Image: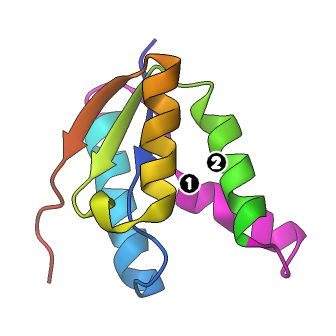
Amino acid sequence: MITVYLSGKITGLDKKEYTRNFLRAENFYKGCGFGVVNPVTIGERILADNPAATYEDFMSADLKALRGCTHIAMLEGWEDSPGAKWERKEAEKLGLEIMQYKVIGRR
């Protein structure tokens, strides 16, 4: 089964904006019949368990989740995110298929 890890800019964006961007991508890939790993969901679980979580905590969990995927989808604007760049490098090392996702319907 194809499992897509979503990678894009989170830090520096309003929570509503990045949540909407990732949810749209998640719905798109699920609609294609793929499994999806959404780092926003991972982050919410981390914060529920540890409100003082650090950037390193988030990235560690995200990279661990990425290793279980077959593909990575780079959301529009990922180039402005150090975390997304890190995830892409890791995906390249793992030999994951890299896809581009254009965020549509932004307001």
Q: Are marks 1 and 2 in contact (CB under 8 Å)?
A: yes
Quadrant in the picture for residue 57: bottom right
Q: Which secondary structure lies at badge 2?
A: helix
- Here the colouring is rainbow
Who's the residue at 39% across and 34% down the image?
A: 72
Residue 20 appears at what percent x and percent y? 35, 70
Taking the image as shown, residue 33 lies to the left or right of residue 1, namely left
Dividing the picture into quadrants, the one containing residue 54 is bottom right
Left or right for 57, reference 103:
right
Q: Earlier in the sequence, mark 1 or mark 2?
A: 1
Most foreground residue, 82 or 6: 82
Residue drawn at the location 44% of the way across and 84% of the way down: 12
Provide residue 25's location: percent of width, then percent of height. Answer: 30, 51
Give the amino acid type for the residue marked by disc 1 in the picture. Pro
- What residue do we see at 15% from left, 53% from top? 102
Residue 63 visible here: yes
Numbered label attached to residue 39: 1
The furthest residue to the top: 1
At label 2, the amino acid type is Asp
Q: Is residue 98 above or below residue 20?
A: above
Q: CA distance from mark 1 to mark 2?
A: 6 Å
Which numbered tag is attached to residue 13? none
- Residue 13, placed above or below residue 96: below
Q: At 66% from the left edge and 63% from the top edge, which residue is drawn?
A: 43
Disc 1, SS: helix
Q: Is 11 within the magenta?
A: no
Residue ID for mark 2: 62
Q: What span is in magenta?
A: 31-54
Question: Quadrant of residue 4 in the image?
Answer: top left
Q: Is residue 61 left or right of residue 35?
A: right
Is 77 situated left or right of 23 in this image?
left
